[in-house]
């Protein structure tokens, strides 16, 4: 099962277990006992290549003594909550579809839209404690320095990204979220093919990001980082397979 190395989502079993615990904590009310049992079984089969398991539904039904419909329902829920990703697998010898590869997705709950919130109960300026002119001057300088630094860092990140991708991310997210999402995107792409670049296939990757962002804004995506990861993996895998096919046709 060496091919599963192409689908592993974590560097170690410990890292995988940590993310699973975060998933279960964040989705405590949505997951029932069967959902948890299915996730636990998938994780036990996903240790050699952390995060990736090649499992038949039949294997899960026998292990948990549950019906086929119950297991399929649990898998669909885990997919909907973006805890796992189901990847279709084609047998390399017979070229037919085999059991799905089940990938446990990374968890990240720090994603936030770039919105500013006003204080709920602002204190009238007339009752605020007075400051000396010197204190006010220092405070204003610190604020300006911080804002200048954030702008500079954000510009630096935008320079690393292709134009369309940079515009898309900066339109919706703050600097910290952009950094974390960019890291997720690089990790997801590297999992399939490091030679494929965002610049080379900018439109493909940008369309994938926009699709996720639109779903996120409508409230259909809970784990933004996990879904971005899965989207970049899918795009990179499609591009990788297309490249292999084109190379084979040229020979």
Image (spheres, grey):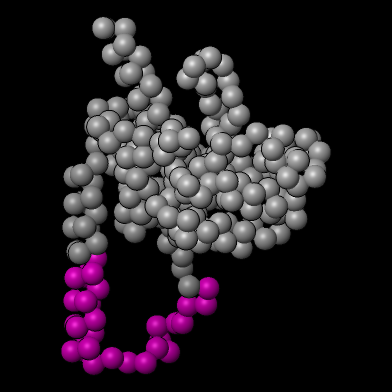
In the rendered view, tell whether residue 24 sits above or below residue 172.
Answer: below
* Residue 158 locus on image (x, y percent): 23, 46
Would you say residue 198 sits in the magenta stretch? no
Is residue 175 in view from this perspective? Answer: yes
In this picture, residue 106 sits left or right of residue 166: right
In this picture, residue 19 sits left or right of residue 151: right
In the rendered view, tell whether residue 88 sits above or below residue 172.
Answer: above
Residue 247 found in image quarter: top left
Q: Residue at x 20, y 44 (%)?
A: 160
- Our reading of the magenta stretch's main secondary structure is helix
* Residue 79 locus on image (x, y percent): 61, 41
Q: Residue at x 19, y 45 (%)?
A: 159
- Residue range in magenta is 120-147
Would you say residue 137 sits in the magenta stretch? yes
In this picture, residue 81 sits left or right of residue 64: left
In the rendered view, tell whether residue 232 sits above or below residue 34.
Answer: above
């Amino acid at each position: 099962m060496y091919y599963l190395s192409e689908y592993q989502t974590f560097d170690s079993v410990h890292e995988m277990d940590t993310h699973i615990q975060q998933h279960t904590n964040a989705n405590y009310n949505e997951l029932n006992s069967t959902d948890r049992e299915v996730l636990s079984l998938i994780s036990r089969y996903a240790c050699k290549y952390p995060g990736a398991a090649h499992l038949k539904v039949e294997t899960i039904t026998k292990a948990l003594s549950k019906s086929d419909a119950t297991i399929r329902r649990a898998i669909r829920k885990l997919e909907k909550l973006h805890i796992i990703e189901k990847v279709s697998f084609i047998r390399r010898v017979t070229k037919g579809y085999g059991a799905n590869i089940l990938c446990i997705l990374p968890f990240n709950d720090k994603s936030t839209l770039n919105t500013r919130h006003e204080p709920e109960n602002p204190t009238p300026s007339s009752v605020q404690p007075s400051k000396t002119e010197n204190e006010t001057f220092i405070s204003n300088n610190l604020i300006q320095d911080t804002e200048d630094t954030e702008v500079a860092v954000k510009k630096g990140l935008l320079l690393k990204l292709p134009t369309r991708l940079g515009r898309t991310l900066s339109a919706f997210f703050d600097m910290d979220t952009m950094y974390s999402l960019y890291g997720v995107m690089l990790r997801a792409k590297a999992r399939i093919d490091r030679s494929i670049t965002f610049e080379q296939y900018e439109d493909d990757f940008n369309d994938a990001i926009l699709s996720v962002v639109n779903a996120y804004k409508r409230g259909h995506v809970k784990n933004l980082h996990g879904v971005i990861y899965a989207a970049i993996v899918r795009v990179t895998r499609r591009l990788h397979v297309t490249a292999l096919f084109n190379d084979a046709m040229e020979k």
